[in-house]
């Protein structure tokens, strides 16, 4: 596994509220790197700033100061078409509430990023089928989202996020709306994708179980990174225990 | 406490309420506009002279009421969708159903009555403005038209309050019967567009047959009389709905298989359309009907407008005849650049008017004769003295003479015989201008001066095209005015119907567009998708509406001289322009809601 960073975050600040009025600083200087092919988790309690951080990293919001680069490209000042193209080509998202278009079938949802790029129709079909069979949803391609279970929906969302072979995959509590079996399956899937296709993954979660699948975990508290945990050679079970212990002391 | 909560909900969503309000105000304003003509019996009687017009207006009233019903249904479901969450919340915090029921009634009625009152005011102003505009730009003369007409206001208010009472009752049932949790999460579910070939084929066939019956009865209105309009109305509405229902689904499903569905957001747009297919077929058939009515009304209105000069020109070859024209009158005639001008000398005997035949042989008198039945084709004949006496159109000469001579016979004498007559010689000057409608002011001056000199020359006795113009114009003014007025009113109604329907879905679309933005869709593509989706919804009923009009115009061949189809490109163009403006406004508002 290479150690070149796919993403670097430098001194990231975010302040809400206009100058003069009552201000709230959600992020107070965040620094970290994600290496290519790494599976990183960000943990923190509600209100710790982890969602704010994710929004900055995923270009959904702009930081007050600081810089983020993904794939050597600074992203904090992207606008308009550049921003749209960057999102379409370099990053993939998976949200807690799936964010599928319920007016389109699973197939159409997965193919959407490709049709947005005006990819030739001949190339779209095999690409969708490949990713779908990888994620075990080949048989649901003609179903609408409301005909699928939560786990299936999230796998469709994952397929849509992966079809453009992004440099970075962001997950915002992707298991939040799933039952424990589906959650486990999805996380296993992430691990497989991460290993086999070397996709870098950044997972934001407050759930220790989900986090235990990561290789490295950053703990956020009050807008700062408070602690870092590496899995190294621990088994997932032991790592889970370690996370629970850390959380127990960290949140005090 | 609950009232306070309700008010905060109201303030929070004032923008949505603004859409709701303006839609309702437009609707009631238009209904009032229509009623201000339809209930004004004196106006209808005075300005049309066609007994059928009253009945046509009654049909129109019924139709508009049905449309209003549907419209308020949509408005109400929009209101309901906005409030569902709030009411669900109230229930969760333990509000009693009775209390909530009260709130719902109150809110629905409050919204309805306020909007209707505003609508009547707006309607009065619109009627005033539009009628002034039409009267000035078309040169119409109208009697007994008043912008404020109490019976119309009363009808509007009664209908709307009645409908809103009904809507409130419906809301009460819908909300209090639904569990609180369901109210909190009431997102619309997609309905999978299904192809049921057999059923849809039957729908297409029945639809086509209904429309064919409708077209046939419109074409044979002279035989079917009033029943024809009723039959056409029912069958065409039914047929349009069935066709839309069957064909629209096919169209969307089939075009999804085409390669273009794989480009950009086209697939998304098609899915959006198929998602709402069932909802849209109803509104699209209504819009198609309204489109046809509006376009038809404007076309017929313009048709009447165009007919006036045609009919005038067929009545006489000359604008006016002046007996013993004064020097200043002759100067005025010259200023008009007449295309033809002749002077005939005559002497008046006790039984006949004696002309010099040689005058006619030198300057033939032009007469107009109809070339066929019910056609605006006329032949012109240049008559010398002999020909004129034989012609059945010789009355056209007498009509131009002074008041005292119009009942006398006409004799043509040789110069010798003429010279023997002892009566004083008089002169008849006849002339024609290029276009009588373009010179009405100058001609009026001439007519007035002539009437001063010949006290017997009342109104219609001046003869010629100018008199014909005045007669026909006043007769057709009412019809023209109604055509334009109704056209604009129907257009406004259909566009607000469509706009409202589309906009009420915008809130649900918002998260879809946000999602597309998140996965990296360019703004230009999003805008394009939005424009295309709305364009389809505007164009489809437009096409059907145009076809309906093309067939429907046949109905008017019996009150219009000549073909009702001549020159229809102009009203079509005007209509397309207005329609386009509505489309652009809808896109603009939709964009503001969806792509904030």
Image: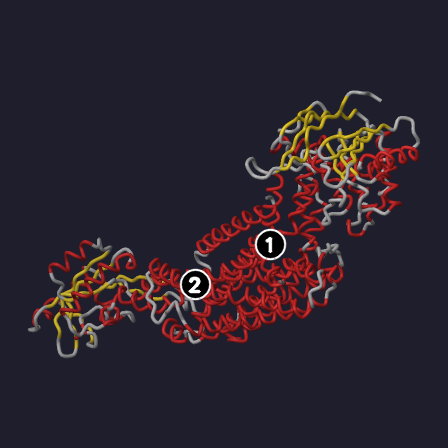
Q: Residue at x 44, y 74 (%)?
A: B151
Circle 1: is it few (<14), some (14-19), or many (20+) Cα within 10 Å?
Answer: some
Mark number, residue B352:
none
Point 77% across, 37% down: residue: A44
Residue visible at 38% across and 73% down in the picture: B43
Report whether residue B563 is seen.
Answer: no
- Packing grade of label 2 (10 A; few <14, some 14-19, many >=20) is many
Task: Where is residue B185? Give x, y as percent.
Answer: 72, 56
Q: CA distance from mark 2 to mark 1?
A: 26 Å
**Cβ atoms under marks 2 and 1 closer than 8 Å:** no
Name the image quarter holding residue A164: top right
- Disc nearest the viewer among 2 and 1: 1
| Left or right: B300, with A234 as reference point | left
Q: Are marks 2 and 1 on the same chain?
A: yes
Q: Residue at x 60, y 53 (%)?
A: B537
Please tell me whether residue A134 is drawn above or below residue B434 in the rendered image.
above
Q: Where A68 sits versus B398, above or below?
A: above
Q: Residue A167's spot in the image, x, y percent?
A: 75, 28
Quarter assignment of residue B109: bottom right
Q: Position of residue B572 (x, y in %)?
A: 48, 55
Residue corresponding to mark 2: B485
Q: How is the image coloured?
A: secondary structure
Chain under callout 2: B
Nearer to the camera, B247 or B426? B247
Relative side of A206 to B483, left or right: right
* SS state under label 1: helix
Front one among B565 and A238: A238
Q: Which residue is mark 1?
A: B502
Circle 1 chain: B
């Amino acid at each position: 596994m290479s150690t070149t960073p796919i993403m670097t975050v430098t001194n990231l600040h975010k302040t809400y509220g206009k100058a003069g009025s009552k201000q709230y600083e959600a992020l107070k200087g965040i620094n970290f790197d994600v290496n290519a092919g790494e599976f990183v988790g960000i943990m923190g309690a509600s209100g710790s700033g982890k969602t704010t951080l994710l929004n900055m990293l995923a270009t959904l919001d702009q930081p007050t100061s600081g810089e983020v680069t993904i794939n050597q490209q600074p992203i904090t000042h992207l606008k308009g078409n550049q921003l749209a193209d960057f999102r379409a080509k370099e990053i993939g998202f998976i949200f807690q509430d799936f964010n599928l278009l319920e007016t389109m079938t699973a197939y159409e949802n997965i193919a959407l990023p490709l049709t947005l790029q005006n990819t030739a129709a001949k190339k779209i079909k095999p690409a969708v089928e490949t990713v779908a069979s990888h994620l075990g949803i080949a048989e649901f391609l003609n179903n609408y989202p409301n005909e699928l279970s939560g786990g299936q929906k999230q796998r469709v969302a994952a397929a849509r996020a992966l079809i453009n072979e992004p440099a970075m995959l962001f997950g915002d509590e992707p298991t939040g709306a799933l039952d424990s079996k589906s959650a486990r399956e999805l996380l296993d899937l992430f691990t497989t994708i991460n290993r086999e296709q070397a996709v870098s993954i950044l997972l934001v979660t407050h759930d220790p179980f989900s986090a235990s699948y990561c290789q490295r975990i950053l703990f956020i508290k009050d807008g700062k990174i408070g602690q870092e945990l590496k899995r190294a050679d621990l088994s997932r079970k032991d790592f889970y225990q370690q996370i629970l212990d850390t959380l127990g002391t960290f949140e005090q | 406490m609950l009232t306070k909560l309700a008010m905060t909900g109201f303030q929070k969503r004032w923008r949505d309420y603004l859409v709701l309000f303006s839609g309702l105000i437009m609707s009631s304003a238009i209904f009032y506009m229509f009623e201000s003509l339809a209930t004004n019996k004196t106006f209808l009687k005075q300005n049309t002279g066609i007994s059928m017009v009253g009945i046509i207006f009654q049909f129109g009233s019924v139709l508009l009421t049905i449309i209003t019903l549907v419209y308020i249904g949509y408005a109400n479901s929009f209101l309901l969708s906005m409030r569902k969450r709030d009411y669900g919340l109230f229930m969760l915090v333990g509000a009693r159903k009775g209390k909530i029921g009260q709130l719902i009634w109150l809110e629905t009625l409050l919204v309805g009555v306020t909007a209707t009152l505003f609508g009547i005011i707006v309607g009065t102003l619109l009627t005033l403005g539009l009628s002034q505009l039409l009267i000035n730009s078309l040169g119409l003369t109208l009697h007994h038209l008043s912008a404020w007409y109490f019976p119309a206001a009363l009808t509007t208010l009664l209908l709307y309050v009645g409908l809103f009472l009904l809507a409130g009752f419906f809301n009460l049932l819908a909300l209090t019967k639904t569990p609180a949790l369901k109210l909190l999460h009431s997102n619309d579910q997609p309905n999978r567009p299904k192809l049921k070939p057999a059923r849809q084929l039957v729908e297409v066939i029945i639809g086509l047959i209904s429309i064919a019956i409708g077209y046939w009865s419109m074409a044979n209105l002279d035989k079917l009389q009033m029943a024809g309009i009723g039959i056409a109305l029912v069958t065409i509405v039914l047929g349009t709905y069935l066709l839309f229902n069957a064909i629209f689904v096919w169209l969307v499903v089939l075009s999804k298989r085409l390669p273009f569905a794989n480009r950009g957001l086209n697939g998304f747009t098609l899915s959006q359309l198929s998602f709402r297919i069932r909802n849209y077929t109803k509104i699209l058939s209504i819009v198609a009907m309204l489109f046809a009515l509006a376009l038809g009304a404007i076309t017929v209105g313009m048709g009447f407008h165009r007919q006036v000069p045609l009919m005038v020109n067929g009545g006489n070859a000359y604008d006016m005849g002046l007996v013993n024209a004064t020097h200043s009158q002759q100067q005025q005639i010259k200023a008009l650049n007449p295309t033809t001008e002749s002077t005939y000398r005559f002497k008046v005997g006790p039984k006949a008017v004696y002309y010099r035949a040689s005058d006619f042989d030198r300057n033939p008198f032009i007469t107009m004769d109809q070339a066929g039945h019910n056609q605006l084709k006329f032949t012109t004949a240049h008559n010398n003295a002999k020909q004129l006496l034989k012609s059945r159109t010789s009355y056209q000469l007498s009509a131009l003479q002074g008041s005292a001579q119009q009942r006398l016979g006409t004799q043509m004498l040789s110069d010798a015989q003429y010279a023997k007559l002892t009566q004083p010689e008089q002169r008849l000057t006849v002339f024609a201008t290029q276009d009588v409608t373009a010179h009405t002011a100058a001609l009026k001056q001439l007519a007035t001066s002539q009437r001063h000199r010949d006290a017997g020359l009342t109104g219609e006795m001046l003869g010629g095209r100018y008199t014909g113009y005045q007669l026909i114009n006043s007769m057709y003014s009412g019809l023209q005015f109604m055509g334009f007025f109704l056209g604009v009113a129907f257009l406004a109604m259909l566009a607000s119907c469509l706009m409202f329907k589309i906009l009420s879905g915008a809130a649900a679309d918002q998260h879809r567009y946000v999602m597309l933005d998140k996965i990296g869709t360019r703004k230009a593509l999003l805008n394009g998708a939005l424009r295309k989706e709305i364009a389809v919804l505007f164009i489809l009923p437009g096409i059907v509406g145009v076809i309906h009009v093309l067939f429907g115009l046949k109905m008017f061949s019996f009150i219009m001289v000549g073909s009702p189809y001549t020159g229809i490109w102009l009203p079509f163009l005007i209509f397309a322009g207005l329609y386009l403006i509505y489309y652009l406004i809808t896109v603009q508002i939709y964009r503001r809601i969806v792509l904030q």
